[in-house]
Amino acid sequence: MTFESFLFFVVMWPILVYYPLAHWIWNTDGWLAQLGVMDFAGGLVIHSSSGVAAFVVAAFLQPRKNKDKLGETAHNVPLTVVGGMIVWAVWNFFNGGSAYKASHQAASALINTQLSAVASSLLWMILLYRRDGKFY
């Protein structure tokens, strides 16, 4: 991907994807909001649309030229663990605090936060085991 392509993406993606999606869901007059779609903690507008955008960009990128030399191991395990801990803590604070009170909605958000992290971790482990035949 060239720098010009990157600039085009950075300018056009918010205009074509993010702003309309945010309006459709977060504005009470938006058609998705009128259908009852709720975006708790920005998961749909921010994370899902960014994930789809990352997938589309990844589909256009060429494979790394030195992938065999780099391998797929962690380069700095302590920093990886610290980063994961920070993300996990902030994820819980953000999702649990999005209800603005201690209620069943906040508790449900925290439980769903934990269950989604567990499910994705287990799936990652299973896929790596199926691919490599061993646990890391």
Image (cartoon, rainbow, N blue to C red):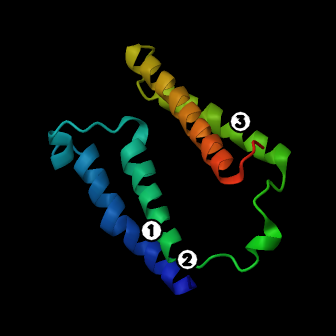
Q: For mark 3, what is the residue?
A: 85
**N-terminal-most mark, 1 or 3:** 1
- Please give left or right for residue 64 compared with residue 51 in the image: right
Q: Secondary structure at mark 3?
A: helix
How many other residues sit within 10 Å of disc 3, few (<14), some (14-19) or many (≥20)?
A: few
Quadrant of the rendered structure where residue 73 is? bottom right
Asked whether the viewer can see residue 30, the reply is: no
User: Label 1 to label 2, Cα distance in Å?
Assistant: 9 Å
Distance, label 2 to label 3, CA atoms, is 30 Å
Do callouts 1 and 3 mark residues in contact (Cβ within 8 Å)?
A: no
Residue at which label 1 appears = 56
- Which amino acid does the dot numbered 2 rest on? Leu
| Residue at position x 39%, y 68% in the image | 13
Please, what is the three-letter code of the amino acid marked with disc 3?
A: Met
Q: Residue furthest front?
A: 133
Badge nearest the viewer, 2 or 3: 2
Q: Which residue is mark 2?
A: 61
The quarter of the picture where the N terminus appears is bottom right
Q: Nearer the viewer, residue 125 or 134?
A: 134
Horizontal side of 134 relative to 87 (left or right) equals: right
Q: Nearer the viewer, residue 108 or 102?
A: 108
SS assignment at label 1: helix
Residue at the (49%, 82%) spot, across then down = 5
Q: Looking at the rendering, in which quadrant would you find the C terminus? A: top right
The quarter of the picture where residue 38 lies is top left
Q: In the rendered view, tell whether residue 99 sits above or below residue 18.
A: above
